[in-house]
Every structure is written in C-alpha cells, then in structure tokens.
Amino acid sequence: MKDFLYSFKAKPTRATIFTMLSLLALGTYSSFAQEEAGPTVADAIFTANNIWMLVATFLVFIMHMGFASIETGLTRAKNTTNILFKNVSIIAIGILTYAIVGFNLMYPGEFSIGQYFGFAGFGIASPEGAAGLIEYADGGYTYWTDFIFQAMFAATAATIVSGAVAERMKLSSFLIFSTIFVAFVYTVAGSWKWGGGWLDAMGFYDFAGSTLVHSVGGWGALIGAMLLGPRLGKYTKSGLIKPIPGHSLPLATGGMFLLWFGWYGFNGGSVLSADPGLISLVFVTTSLAAAAGIIGAMVLSWIVFKKPDLSMILNGALAGLVGITAGADVMTPMSSAIIGFIAGLLVVASVIFFDKYAKVDDPVGAISVHLVCGIWGTLAVGIFAAEFSFMTQLIGVLAYGVFTVACALILFLVIKMIMGIRVSPEEELMGLDLGEHGMMAYPDFQQIAESGGSTMTMASDGEN
C-alpha cells in the first residue's frame, strides 16, 4: 500500500488516502466473509431442505382431503357423514400412534431382532439442540420435520382400507383396526426398507411407497372387503352385478385433483432434500405417469363399456401416480409414461376382475388402484431401471404381501369374533349416517327419510 501511494509524483490527496483506506477495509471484510462462507452456505442448504420438507408435509396432508372427497363422491349420499368421520379420524390416529410408537418402530434403535424387527422406545425423542439434524442429505433437516413428514404417510395406509370397506363396516371396528394396523403393521413392514432392514440390505427399492404404503394398504383393503362381503343389492341372487353409482362425481373429481396435487409432496418430499435437479425430475415423472394413466384407463374402459367412463379415468390418474411412486427418482420421462399407461390399463382390468369374477365389492376401486398398481410400480423398477434386480423387487412384493395379509386377517378375524365388523342389514339400508351417527350430511334429505324415504331407499338397493 505504501509503495502504491508514493508511486505518484504528486503528494497524495485526502481523497486518494480515503479511497485506499476504503479498499483496505473492503479487502479485510472480503477475507472475513470468505472465512465464513462455508457455514453460511451450509446454513442456507439446511434451511432450504427444511422448508421444502415442510412444504412437502402439508402437501401430503392435503391428500387426506383428496381421499375423503373421492371416497365420498364414489359412494352414496346416505353414508357421507360416516366416510368423512373415518377420514378425519384416520389422520388423528396416524399422527398420534406414530408419535407414541410408530416412528420408533419404523426407524428402530437398540432393541432389535436382526434386521426384521426393532424398537427405539416409546414417544418422540428430544434431540440435543433445537434442530436435531437428520443427515439424509447435505445439510439435512430437523428431527421434528422428519417426524411430521413421515407421520403424514402413516395414516395413508388406513385411508386406503377405508374406501374398500365403505358403506357396510362398523365404525368402531374400523377405528380399532386402523389404530393397530397403522401403529404396528405399517411401521414394522416399513422398517424392512426405510428403516434399514433386511429388504434394504438385499437391495429392494421403493422410493416413495408403491409397496410400503400403497400395497400394504391395498392388502389390508382386500382382506377387509373379502371378509365383509358385498354391499346389500350389489349382486342379485342369480349373481348378476347391479351397479351402485356414487352420489357426486364432481366431488370425486375434485378429490382426484387434490390427490394429484398432494402427490408432488408425496414423491417430491421423498427426495429428502431440496435438490433442484432431482425434485424437478420427480415432478416430471409423476406428472407424466398420472397423465398416461388417464389415457390408458380411457382407452380400455371406452373399448369395454362402449362409453367413456369418468370414474375409470379418475382411478386411471391415481393408478399412474401409484405406479410411478416406487421409482419416480430413477425413471426417464418416457419410461414413466409407459409405466403410467400400463397402470391405467391395469386398473380398469382389475376393477372388472374383482367386480365381475372375484365378486369382491370395492366401492371406490381402492384395491385395484393401490394394491394392483402398487405391485406393478414396484416390479417396474426392476424392469425399467437397470441398476435394480427384478427378482429382488419380486421378493419384496411377496414378503410384504404375506406379512400384511397375515396381520390383516388376524386383526379382522379377532375384531369380528369380539364385536363384529359389519353393521346390521337395517342399518346398512337406512344408511350409516343415521345408523352410526344419527345425522345426515345433507340435511335437506332428512325430511324425506323421516316421511318414508328410507323405504324408498331400501327398494332402490335391490336384492341381496
């Protein structure tokens, strides 16, 4: 600095000296800023990750409104209050049981039996410091964010069961089943992959839960629907199918869009960081699969039924979303479109199979969407992603199927033996809104029911 000042022939002015001192101060500040650059960047990454994970959390939360809407819309008006009550209760059950026991079953600690079962104690831990970093990605995110994001997933499995047993299952029996299923079955099964269990060690891959969430819920839905039997009037004495249409296709359509919207958090949040490239890819593959699922369902249902069926393309969108969930982060855009299109075909074929041949009454198509397309999406990872083994994916699908079917069967049979699982025929014909809750979702219908409308409802339900 001295040499520089006196390199001028003229004596330095005050302005020159002030300029040099300013430059010196700026250089000192720059050096200090460079020393602090590492922690500052890390803090920014941590904050970005944490914010994105919380955004994804409330997107998954809004999916429960989507489930409630599509289930309500595809069933009859007389059961609306019952269905809404179940869906509100499920989110509460999911969050609370996950806090009490589920989180520490899915991510086990010192109490472990090999890689098959583990437990880290009751309640939510209190990590050191305010954040309690979770190091899944550079910068991680807080322990609390990790818990609440995973808790939103937990209730989804029971929501899937709700749709398949709609309009005929006792509310108390359903709530008991859901509590045990979410608290123990879903979480123990989830630990095998997401908790670093034996399937994870084997190389099984399920990015956001085609099997861990959707197929697990789908297997429970299948067992419940089979044990309950069909709704009154669904099949005539001669075995012919009598369609029972839902009461509000606009409500069902709104539910589908809410689910699609929430799925960006379901899949996008499963990146477990705010990685811009990977989140963008997941958004693209998720969107393409849903769109292709609609087209697949549209094509096949139009061919089979000779008319375009709105309910089928609603389930086609969901089928595509379920199908891509296992591999949304490893699929190319074109592969995701193919997976979604096939899922759309499968959901139509599956609905026809269960309805016409297996005689399993599923009012909303939950088994076809979540179980069948969940299996397809998981196996598709082994078909379209070269780094994963098809046989490993198949072993995972079978393992989850055997475990969940056994648990759901035991649960349903024990509950059936102790308190029953199905409402009385009179209650079913009258509607669960009045039978279980003593209120109707649409008060204008109350007067009709009280003046003889219930008799009309019984007649319209047809033969058993």
Image (cartoon, grey):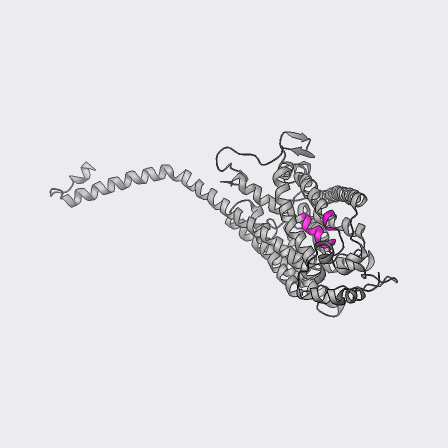
Number of marks in the image? 0
Query: Residue 39: which quarter of the image?
Result: top left
| Residue lying at 76% horizontally and 67% vertically, measured from the top left | 452
Query: Residue 255: which quarter of the image?
Result: bottom right
19 part of magenta stretch = no
Q: Position of residue 355 (x, y in %)?
A: 79, 59
Report the front residue among 356 and 136: 356
| Residue lying at 54% horizontally and 43% vertically, measured from the top left | 145
Query: Residue 242: which quarter of the image?
Result: bottom right
Q: Position of residue 27 (x, y in %)?
A: 28, 40
Q: Main secondary structure of the magenta part?
A: helix
Above/below status of 388 relative to 68? above
Highlighted range, magenta: 157-172
User: Which residue of the protein is positioned furthest toward the bottom in this rendering?
Assistant: 307
Picture quarter with the C terminus: bottom right
Above/below status of 288 relative to 145? below
Report the front residue among 204 and 414: 414
Above/below status of 30 relative to 62? above
Q: Position of residue 166 (x, y in %)?
A: 73, 55
Report the front residue among 19 and 92: 92
Picture quarter with the N terminus: top left
Left or right of residue 33, residue 457 in this image: right
